[in-house]
Amino acid sequence: MIRAPRPQILAASILVALEALGLFLFAAFEVAGLDTERVSIALTTGIFFGLYAGGLLIASVALWRLKGWSRGPIVLAQLIQLGVAWSFAGGATRWVAVILATWAVLCLGLVLSPSTTAEIYPDREQEDDADRA
């Protein structure tokens, strides 16, 4: 029997999938903007971000399917995003930093919430109850 995920898991999955879509678009624009002076940089950057987006999309679907392993890659991606946000923090790009940081903190809050943990790892709650008895 397939359990339907709670709304916060669905929201986290959607946010992570949208993040993956943004990374795919960045990769596509990077490759589309090839010029003869920086072919290798554009290709390697495009490939890297394309693979990063693919992994994030896989983790998003796995989270929606309540697979416990999905949280690790998602949390790591959000921590990386917080670092990227910090690099945009000054000057005219402050708005980019605010968007990236807000997105990452929202995803982290949804993925690491106690109710998400209980939903993804239902056996842990039973083990905790048995340990207390």
Image: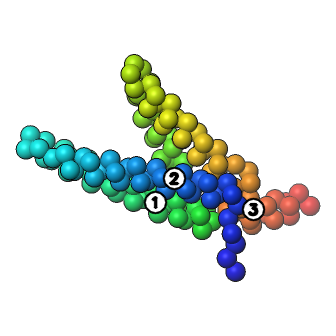
Q: Position of residue 7 (x, y in %)?
A: 69, 58
User: Are circles 3 and 1 on residues that touch, CB within 8 Å?
Assistant: no
Question: Residue at 70% of width from left, 61% of height from top?
Answer: 6
User: Are circles 2 and 1 on residues that touch, CB within 8 Å?
Assistant: yes
Q: Amino acid at mark 1?
A: Leu
Q: Which mark is residue 57?
A: 1
Q: Amino acid at mark 3?
A: Arg
Quadrant of the image for the N terminus?
bottom right
Q: CA distance from mark 3 to mark 1?
A: 26 Å
Image coloring type: rainbow
- Residue at the far right: name it: 133
Q: Which residue is mark 2?
A: 16
Q: Position of residue 121 (x, y in %)?
A: 70, 63
User: Residue 4 appears in which quarter of the rendering?
Assistant: bottom right
Q: Amino acid at mark 2?
A: Val
Name the element at disc 1.
Answer: helix
